[in-house]
Each structure stands twice: as structure tokens, then as C-alpha cells.
């Protein structure tokens, strides 16, 4: 299984990815289990969360472009209300 990848993209990269057409999602501060059935790429619009997988723990925040690998089982701890747009590959 792959690792969670975090990047800080520029506007040109976001435009090339078509981020403005991605689906929105948001969540208040909470903790929940999650599993990715497909690779997800998301762009964090606001907020902050910690994601703990079987081999790593990362923190994501506004401005991050995050890739979650297929089959990842993890725990999301939303620290500050989070808003993102996402797509599956």
C-alpha cells in the first residue's frame, strides 16, 4: 500500500488538475474511521485534520493537495472544521 502524499500546489497546477470541477465535502470537528476504495486526490480549502494510517500519521491543512492511496484504512481527527474538494482516480 502506498503512503499519503501531501503537496503545496501553485495555481497553474490546480488549474491543470481541474480542481474547480471536483466535488465538495466538509466536516465539523470530529473523529471517525475511513477506508479508501479508490485513490482519492483532494485539495483542502479550509481547516485542519490529522489522519492516522497503519504506518504513518500526517496533518493536513488549507492549501494542501493530498493523495490518499487505494485501500488505505485510517482514522480522521478533524481538528478545525474542514472543507475540501476531491476526485477519485
Image (tube, helix red, strand yellow):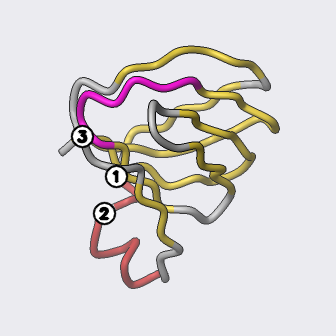
Q: Secondary structure at mark 2?
A: loop
Q: Earlier in the sequence, mark 3 or mark 1?
A: 3
Does the residue at mark 2 contact the one at mark 1 (Cβ under 8 Å)? yes
Does the residue at mark 3 contact the one at mark 1 (Cβ under 8 Å)? no
Does the residue at mark 2 contact the one at mark 3 (Cβ under 8 Å)? no
Image: 57 above or below 72: below
Quadrant placement of the N terminus? top left
Q: Position of residue 24 (x, y in %)?
A: 48, 37
- In this picture, which residue range is highlighted in magenta? 69-75
Q: Position of residue 28 (x, y in %)?
A: 75, 25
Q: Which mark is residue 1?
A: 3
Mark 3 and mark 1: Cα distance apart in space: 28 Å
Q: Is residue 84 magenta?
A: no
Quadrant placement of the C terminus? top left
Tell me the residue at 63%/52% (across/down).
60
- Residue at the far front in the pictured view: 55
Q: Earlier in the sequence, mark 2 or mark 3?
A: 3
Mark 2 and mark 3: Cα distance apart in space: 26 Å
Closer to viewer: mark 2 or mark 3? 3
Q: Is residue 71 magenta?
A: yes
Looking at the image, residue 73 sits to the left or right of residue 33; the answer is: left
| Residue occupied by mark 2 | 18
Image: 1 above or below 75: below
Tell me the residue at 63%/41% (across/down).
83
Q: Secondary structure at mark 1?
A: helix
Amino acid at each position: 500500500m502506498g503512503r499519503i502524499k501531501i503537496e503545496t500546489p501553485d495555481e497553474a497546477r490546480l488549474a491543470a488538475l481541474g480542481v474547480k470541477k471536483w466535488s465538495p465535502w466538509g466536516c465539523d470537528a470530529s473523529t471517525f474511521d475511513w477506508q479508501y476504495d479508490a485513490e482519492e486526490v483532494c485539495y483542502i480549502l479550509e481547516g485542519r485534520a490529522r489522519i492516522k494510517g497503519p504506518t504513518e500519521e500526517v496533518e493536513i491543512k488549507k492549501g494542501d493537495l493530498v493523495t490518499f492511496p487505494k485501500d488505505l484504512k485510517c482514522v480522521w481527527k478533524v481538528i478545525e472544521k474542514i472543507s475540501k474538494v476531491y476526485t477519485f482516480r
